[in-house]
């Protein structure tokens, strides 16, 4: 394990050096070189066991609950002892409830129905899904930035981003699948493939529920878009109806009312923040101001959600004012506000939600933002480990 960690640190250090040189010198590389470098690094990171995060084993555990034991991973009783091999590798000896969408749960069940208790094979399949989504993300991002004068630099900073490569190729996080589907929704909108906008958003929601945040932004962009014809609206309504039907059908096997979201409700009230997080500073300020310890979480939740609400309203107003061309950038602003103030339980790989969308901001903003986000995420990984 020590050798694996050293390999990741060494490759990560090289990537950070290259990353800094690109920022300073404005160097550009061919797309083939960018993709080849990303592929080589992905293979290296996927060749060693997961480091720092064991979520990929949790995917296998939730899939096995469905495929093998026919249990509901959203409502399974907590704190029951279990010797499931995936759960043990996830460093948990007791049952867990799933925070993931039913689409991902169904996909996990399909994977485990093939791999059984061969945990190593399951991990590699989940990694292949993540890496495939990562390369899909790069390709879609390239098309969305096709007319951007500095698109090549943006692709390098994303495809060779050490935080992204580590969390995707080594830890296999499904957040990259969410991002890929959100970018597909934007691409469908850009290409006027209106039928597919809602299905892409629904698929993202079925992977991770956080995708629901961007739906109001898409609705605002559509209402603001004066180029839409009656035929376009019919396609949008048809695609939305089909998406709602598929979402309902996907939820049905797991639906137990509000209890389906028990774990999400718990996370929404739990405060688990890294040292460098803005709300961590807020905790210190509240304690310094004399707020009693039991009241700190209550005040923090209220203030944090209020600040996020302000950011969300500002984003919606800016989108309405600037039109649909600002939609991809609005995703980045909304996720930045949510990660900074609306979310009180934070993991470094959540930054994957934000990173691809900052490249639609003005260049003077996205270059330093890419660097700061990457350093913050890597620092969070080190502090957690």
Image: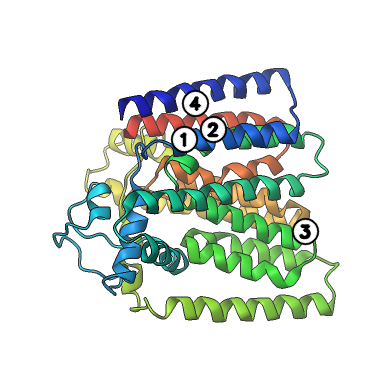
* Numbered tag placed on residue 12 in the rendering: 4
Q: Is residue 258 visible?
A: yes
* Depth check, front residue: 95 or 261: 95
The residue located at (47%, 76%) in the rendering is: 250
The residue located at (64%, 76%) in the rendering is: 240
Task: Single out the mark in the foreground, 4 or 3.
Answer: 4
Labels 4 and 2: the sequence-earlier one: 4
Q: Is residue 268 visible?
A: no
* Numbered tag placed on residue 368 in the rendering: none
Q: CA distance from mark 4 to mark 2?
A: 9 Å
* Depth check, front residue: 218 or 320: 218
State whether residue 367 is above or below residue 315: above
> Mark 1 sits on what residue?
45
Q: CA distance from mark 1 to mark 3?
A: 34 Å
Label 2 crowd bin: few (<14), some (14–19), many (20+), radius 10 Å? many
Say left or right for 161 vs 174. Answer: right
Say left or right for 369 vs 63. Answer: right
Q: CA distance from mark 2 to mark 1?
A: 6 Å
* Numbered tag placed on residue 41 in the rendering: 2
State whether residue 32 is above or below residue 21: below
Q: CA distance from mark 1 to mark 4?
A: 10 Å
Asked whether the beta carbons under mark 4 and mark 3 sit within 8 Å of each other, the answer is no
Q: Secondary structure at mark 3?
A: helix
Asked whether the beta carbons under mark 2 and mark 1 sit within 8 Å of each other, the answer is yes
Q: Where is residue 344 shown, x and y percent of the image?
A: 38, 48
Instruction: Tell me the quarter of the picture where residue 99 sits.
Output: bottom left
Q: Secondary structure at mark 2?
A: helix
Q: Where is residue 254 shown, x and y percent of the image?
A: 37, 76
The residue located at (79%, 61%) in the rendering is: 191
Q: CA distance from mark 4 to mark 3?
A: 34 Å
> Mark 3 sits on what residue?
190
Instruction: Tell me the quarter of the picture where residue 39 sits.
Output: top right
């Amino acid at each position: 394990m020590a050798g694996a960690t050293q390999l990741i640190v060494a490759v990560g250090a090289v990537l950070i050096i290259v990353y800094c040189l690109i920022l300073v010198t404005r160097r550009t590389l061919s797309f083939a070189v960018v993709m080849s470098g990303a592929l080589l690094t992905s293979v290296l990171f996927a060749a060693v066991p997961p480091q720092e995060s064991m979520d990929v084993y949790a995917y296998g555990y939730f899939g096995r609950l469905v495929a093998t034991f026919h249990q509901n991973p959203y409502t399974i009783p907590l704190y029951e002892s279990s010797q499931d091999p995936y759960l043990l590798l996830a460093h948990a000896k007791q049952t867990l409830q799933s925070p993931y969408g039913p689409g991902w749960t169904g996909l996990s069940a399909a994977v485990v129905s093939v791999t059984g208790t061969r945990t190593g094979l399951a991990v590699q399949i989940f990694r292949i899904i993540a890496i495939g989504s990562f390369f899909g993300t790069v390709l879609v991002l390239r098309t969305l930035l096709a007319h951007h004068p500095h698109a090549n630099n943006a692709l390098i900073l994303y495809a060779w981003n050490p935080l992204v490569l580590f969390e995707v190729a080594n830890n296999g996080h499904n957040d990259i699948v969410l991002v890929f589907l959100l970018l597909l929704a934007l691409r469908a909108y850009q290409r006027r493939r209106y039928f597919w906008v809602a299905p892409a958003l629904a698929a993202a929601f079925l992977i991770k529920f956080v995708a629901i945040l961007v739906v109001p932004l898409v609705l605002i962009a559509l209402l603001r878009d004066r180029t839409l014809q009656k035929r376009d609206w019919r396609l949008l309504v048809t695609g939305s109806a089909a998406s709602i039907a598929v979402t309902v059908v996907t939820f049905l096997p797991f639906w137990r009312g509000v209890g389906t979201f028990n774990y999400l409700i718990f996370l929404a009230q739990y405060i688990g923040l890294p040292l460098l997080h803005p709300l961590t500073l807020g905790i210190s300020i509240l304690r310094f101001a004399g707020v009693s310890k039991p009241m700190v979480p209550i005040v923090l939740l209220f203030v944090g959600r209020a600040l996020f609400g302000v950011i969300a309203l500002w984003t919606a107003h800016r989108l309405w004012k600037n039109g649909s061309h600002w939609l991809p950038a609005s995703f980045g602003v909304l996720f930045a506000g949510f990660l900074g103030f609306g979310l009180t339980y934070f993991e470094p790989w959540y930054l994957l939600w934000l990173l691809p969308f900052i490249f639609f901001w003005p260049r003077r903003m996205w270059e330093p933002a890419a660097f700061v986000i990457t350093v913050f995420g890597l620092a969070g990984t080190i502090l957690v480990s």
